[in-house]
Image (cartoon, coloured by chain):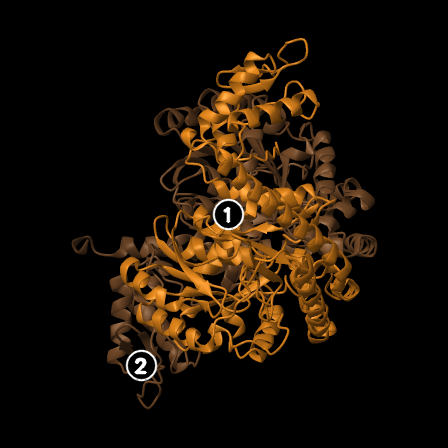
Chain colours: A brown, B orange
Amino acid sequence: MGMYIELDRQGEVPLYQQIRNFLKEQILGGSLPPGSRLPSTRSLARRLGVARITVQEAYDELISEGLLTAHVGRGTFVLGPDGRSPAPSSPPEPPWEVSPSRLSTRAILRDMLRMAASRDILSFAAGVPAPEFFPVEGLRRAINRVLRREGVSALQYDVPEGLLLLRQAISRHLSEMGIAAAPEAILNTSGTQQAIDLVARTLVEPGDAVVLESPTYIGAIDVFEARGAKILAVPVDAEGMRVEALKPLLVRYRPRLIYTIPTFHNPSGSSMSLERRRQLLALAREYAVPILEDDAYSELYYRESPPPPLRALDTSGHVIYLGGFSKTLFAGLRFGYMVVPEGLRERLTYAKQTADLHTSSLIQWAVLEFIRREGIHTHLRRIRAACLARRDAMARSMEVHFPPGVQWALPQGGLYFWVRLPREVTAFEVFFQGLARGVAVAPGPAFFPDRSGEEYIRLNFSLHPPERIEEGIRKLGETVGFLLERARRARLRRQRVPAALL
Amino acid sequence: MGMYIELDRQGEVPLYQQIRNFLKEQILGGSLPPGSRLPSTRSLARRLGVARITVQEAYDELISEGLLTAHVGRGTFVLGPDGRSPAPSSPPEPPWEVSPSRLSTRAILRDMLRMAASRDILSFAAGVPAPEFFPVEGLRRAINRVLRREGVSALQYDVPEGLLLLRQAISRHLSEMGIAAAPEAILNTSGTQQAIDLVARTLVEPGDAVVLESPTYIGAIDVFEARGAKILAVPVDAEGMRVEALKPLLVRYRPRLIYTIPTFHNPSGSSMSLERRRQLLALAREYAVPILEDDAYSELYYRESPPPPLRALDTSGHVIYLGGFSKTLFAGLRFGYMVVPEGLRERLTYAKQTADLHTSSLIQWAVLEFIRREGIHTHLRRIRAACLARRDAMARSMEVHFPPGVQWALPQGGLYFWVRLPREVTAFEVFFQGLARGVAVAPGPAFFPDRSGEEYIRLNFSLHPPERIEEGIRKLGETVGFLLERARRARLRRQRVPAALL
């Protein structure tokens, strides 16, 4: 059940009353028809980030008003207008929460991003390249050629590491980026998300420490949290991961892995300097810690090409490298690859097989044929030009429409502006108030392993054409302006309260 | 490095000498060129199922012969003819075995199945439908229509649970099978293997007990072993899982999950009777244990249609149902789906998102368009007829070519004969000796959680046309005949040894 309740934590109405009011509206308005089962108090409390007792108070009030009924072991149900319970009489499902729940406040953040994806919202929340530049026709031609030429063999089972011809093509592609990787070193995956997950399940046991950047890619936080890892967060600045903060963590916690996005970092947009790359590699070698290098964005540069990937500088087999085409060719195709040091190949291949046998054969053939016949360089040039124009459009719009106090740096690559809000305004307020105005952002805390970062929002600039960007940024500017004004008034109200009452 | 050494455990040559001889041949023959790194003694010992000291003895002998050199911390390398070590001088990779290895003898079994897939082997080892009946043209048309009509939206990111239109189509398809499942109850996956993995990571913590059938699907054993579960094995007979053996396990171990393939069980071919299905559901409810029903084969029936799926009989939300088209439409497309009880949906959706964000959008659109426009019923009828003809061809060939003492039952559905060997012959012997004659089988122990089952082999009958089936079965018959004769002679030799020496 998707229930999104905007709570005003600074307001005068108690939280339980706000929840009660919302539910009552839903019940009387018919959105929660008779017989609906409400979420458990525990689950709703977790989703809203409030105490369980707060939700229980709201439910109790609605029960005493005759709108809800509670059945021990079955849950809480909406009553019909006649006061009769249409709750099902079948026996209950098994107790699903048999093992410790993996859900967390991250699920709420994910739900928020999902709301942002609904049809009538102009969303800057996603991490998607410009879809109108996807080479759909080229892909269609590639698939036709493949199915005509290869027939059933393009649809048959494959080995877990993936289609050899494609791994050979990727090996050549990587050599252009300065990465020497034999086809046997390459493992094809169903996107970068899967690659991170495979590495986690292979190298990280519950309780093991791993180093993440702070902020970092949401999906990586999801993986390492789900794996039960202890997450050590290293801050990022304009030169990428602050490597000097890493060493004490290596000494003290002996982590199993360092996950980094060195180039056009998501969400901050910064790139690790060459100097820091060398320092990071030296530390990894000194403490024998593998590095997981997520290189999703390095081909999306807008001025000069970025420093070489860590994997190109690695002489000792400490880097596991992740690449793919989701941010440049086709987001939803779900294809990625990893370059794996020799000592780890057998175990990662086995993990891949356990996870999903192998990546779709048809998808692999399609990517191969596209790379071979259509080429990706022409396409990359086009998409870079389009993204650059959109980046500049967003920068101009922000200068015009954002109130003073909002800060950002111009990203030299990737897909995002990382925007710092004025002190009086939080990312969640901007999210919900923006939504009410039809525009969505990605709230900062989604990217921080410790859920901090309420002063940040991430804005994707590649998805919409310049006119839409302008429109959305104008609405966002209004949103932030409104919140600043509201905060100013609240401050004034507080000042008017007689001192004796404080 | 793929090294397959056939060891003769009953023979007179000591095991370490057999290993030494094999490696020496490889080195002198050039298959292991100078500079090659040999597997660690631990890893090779594990792969061969011998003691580590046995491998160490073989290596030591080759070192004293000047063929190998060992470097502490770097490994053992093949020397050049000049006795010089071309071993790399770069520093070593990090110690990858930082966490307990998940690899096991299962990896050897997997390697064996891989050998069976090499080009010049006539393999009955795979679990693949008849590929020449894959509707390649229909799929090609479907993809063309989709890409022309939907454009980039067929290539864009999707929600984790998958394309709603496809989930609606699956909901209708399931209702024809007697399963009432709303689209919201359906979660699309990248094949059934992934579905099993998602359930394991959601419901099973390391150390938790799970019930598997014995024998069962290899990929399920892989998943639950990798998850660190305690596997409880319940035997299967001609009426499927022996449910009466289940109850004491439920009482004693309180398992988190019961995994079953009730219909045309892989590998045994048997189907659970209606009576047993009801008993299993009653037990699941009584002990509040969820059932994971893997229904990969029920649409491949050759006489009458099988009893209804457990999910169709379940009135209390205890069954998680897995379906897909890998065994009927396209094996390598990697699409499957699961029907999820309400209380588990949120967590499974989150697990899917963590694993790979979502299943390839293009694959989902292609499956949808194929189901909608081409239909699957005509296709299912064709593939059933083809598989039936092949089943009968294999049965006839086995009657002609197999020596007495080999036993099997005629499967009423699915893709396999489950063959019991004469007492004197083991599955591994048949595997290696068959390979030498160009024909491969799946050895029984691959399917048993406890690696028993050396008296069984599994033969797939759907992949090859009848003439090839005849040829392969003839070779297999020769193989078994040869092994029986060898066993007879060994027995005679033993009888000839003077009693004084015994």
Above/below status of A203 relative to A107: above
Residue type beneath disc 1:
Gly
Q: How many circles with numbers are drawn on the protein? A: 2
Q: Is residue A252 left or right of residue A134?
A: left
Q: Position of residue A54 (x, y in %)?
A: 27, 64
Q: Residue at x 36, y 85 (%)?
A: A86
Chain on which label 1 sits: A
Q: Position of residue B471 (x, y in %)?
A: 74, 54
* Residue farthest to the left, as pictured: A500
Q: For the residue carrying disc 2, how many other residues have a C-alpha within 10 Å: few (<14), some (14-19), or many (20+)?
A: many
Residue identified by numbered label 1: A219
Q: Is residue B209 left or right of residue A389?
A: left
The residue tagged with tag 2: helix, strand or loop?
loop
**Front-lying residue, B176 or B155:** B176
Q: Measure how far apart labels 2 and 1 are at the Cα level.
A: 39 Å
Are callouts 2 and 1 both on one chain? yes
Q: Residue at x 52, y 58 (%)?
A: B195
Q: Residue at x 55, y 44 (%)?
A: B109
Residue identified by numbered label 2: A67
Quadrant of the drawing holding the N terminus of chain B: top right
Image marks 2 and 1: residues in contact by CB distance under 8 Å? no
- Residue A395 visible in rendering: no
Residue A69 quadrant: bottom left
- Residue B329 visible in rendering: yes
Q: Position of residue A219 (x, y in %)?
A: 50, 47
